[in-house]
Amino acid sequence: MRRYDSLIIAAAIVVLGGLLSLVLADYRLRLLNVSVISAIAVIGFNFAFGLAGLISLGHAAFVGLGAYTLAILTTALGWSPWLAIPVAILVTTVFAGMIGYPLLRLRGHYLALATLGLNVSFTIVVTNWITLTGGTNGISGIPELRLGGFAFNDERRFLWLGLVLLALCAAFAITLQRSRHGRAMMAVRDDETAARMTGIDVTRVKITALCLSAAFAALSGTLFAAHVRFVAPEDFNYAHSIIYLAMLIVGGEGAVAGAVIGAALLTFLPEWLRFLGDAYLAFFGLMLLAILVFLPTGLVGLTGRLRRLGWGAKVERTP
Amino acid sequence: MTLLQATAISKRFGGLMALSEVDFTVAPGEFVAVIGPNGAGKSTFLNVLTGLTLPSAGNVQFDGRDITRAPTHGRIRAGLGRTFQHGRLFSRLSVLENVMTGAAIRTDRSESQLREASLGMLDRMGLADEAKRPIDSLSYGQRRMVELCRALACGPRVLLLDEPAAGLNSGEVELLMARLIALRAEHELAVVLIEHNMGMVMRLAERILVLNFGCRIAEGTPAKVQSDPAVLSAYLGEGYNNARD
Ligand SMILES: Nc1ncnc2c1ncn2[C@@H]1O[C@H](COP(=O)(O)OP(=O)(O)OP(=O)(O)O)[C@@H](O)[C@H]1O
Ligand SMILES: [Mg+2]
């Protein structure tokens, strides 16, 4: 059964999302698109934070770098978005690899602070490098995505594209997580010394995890840019990094399904709780706290916990 | 012929000489024990051999290559293996997955080959039934055995064991000894055993190195070491006196 998890999750995303795309309308469809785009970024973040244990608070900078690269290539240079997407992913991944070497010497809180600094620097650069990024005015006029005569130019059509990409990302992430590479990342987070002692090159595994997380972030960023067709600095400031972190923790760190569930939940929650008004943030904070304390493995951890209850009962019966 | 050779290893922690000019060799397939009182520098010595700490002086050679400053993972890939005094497993991975991380040292193995090799190793160590269990559901003795499996799955030529019998009950110690003997019979596996359990050391070791305050105070066959006056006063003396009481 575990062997087919990646297919099951990919199918669930396409089928469930596809059904929702038919019944939902307007603003909800837009939120669903935002969920899907965020989910891709959070799946990436799971490699760095959930698997390898890198406490990064700069994930939104990678999303932003992907988005801005696409925006600049398509508007200033007139590239096709389909060509700009892989180039944006490549640029962001190489950038992550380059900053990874000095950055990953830091651990825990120091790494968190340094990546937070990276995110703040990113915002400062895109705000002030006006000739390239348009400063606070951002970049508009990003072309729509189209396949032949079919343009992904309304919320429903864009969602179909997003769902297919999300399903592919989820299946790929699950396969990778269940491979030797995923186990190596988890080993590094659990015990670096023991990981070294099983022949794992810890530095390389950490950099790979950071690069993977950046690649997914960049894809998410390019989709964001192609969806809104406009990018501005505040879309990628450090607050978004914290939201990605919250999405992963609520859904369940270490699990791809958790990343998707967390992204959807935290995108829709402000809508569902609009009646709370200003009290929403207080509620949100308390909910996060409750999950950290009572459900440290997030919402997907609930299923594991139930399964283990059944399993524990079986063990008790054996003499 | 020597496989692992440490020459004049010294290690200083501030004002403390944890190791002073220790020489040590291991031949292929040899079983060597390293003993000494608490704080003698035994674990520090293994840390130097595996690259977790760099020596202040001296050098380490493995299979004819100088590995004094080589990274730990490189030494493991070259054929060193080690378990820890205080058990270090990957707590988020299952028993099988822990062993598979070790087996993955061979990059040419497919996922199913990794699984098979690891299951085979668990089976040989009597842990086949525990393969799917999470680490936190194992007994202390089982955990130590899983750690041994993980180290063995890396296919080492020299296996360094830091007090593998600590915390095991007498039945488990017997089992551990029987399995170590069987392993050595099958592969040409050299073992370096750090152990406070003298019964185990005397039965298994072909040669014993005795450390005290970071210095080598004796080395030789179990019979020779047992009657060495320096050893008797530093270490075994207490043990024997206690045993006689
Ligand atoms: N990282 C370190 N920093 C400072 N001192 C250390 C460090 N590691 C070990 N020491 C000291 O070096 C000495 C040797 O320690 P080591 O752990 O090697 O002894 P051991 O022979 O393994 O003892 P035991 O039988 O208790 O395991 C001890 O005095 C210890 O306090
Ligand atoms: Mg020790």
Image (tube, coloured by chain):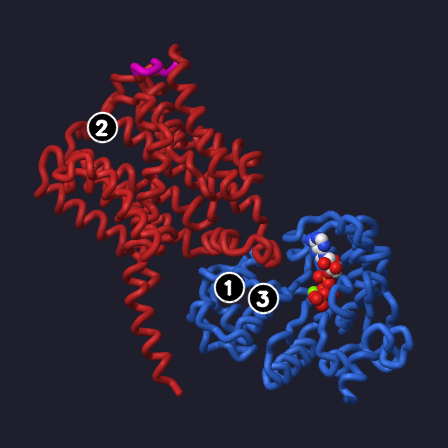
Chain colours: A red, B blue
Residue A282 location (% of width, % of height): 25, 41
Circle 2 Cα neighbour tier, 10 Å, few/some/many (<14 / 14–19 / ≥20): some
- The type of residue carrying mark 3 is Gly
Q: Is residue A159 visible?
A: no
- The type of residue carrying mark 2 is Arg
Circle 1 Cα neighbour tier, 10 Å, few/some/many (<14 / 14–19 / ≥20): many
Q: Whole-Å distance between the Cαs marked 3 and 1?
A: 13 Å
Residue B87, disc: 3
Viewport quadrant of the N terminus of chain B: bottom right
Circle 3 Cα neighbour tier, 10 Å, few/some/many (<14 / 14–19 / ≥20): some
Residue A142 location (% of width, % of height): 27, 20
Disc 2 with disc 1 on a shared chain: no
* Mark 2 residue's CB less than 8 Å from ligand 1: no
Where does the magenta region start and end? A132-137
Pointer 3 indicates a residue of which chain? B
Residue A146, disc: 2
| Residue A63 vs residue A151, the one in the foreground | A63
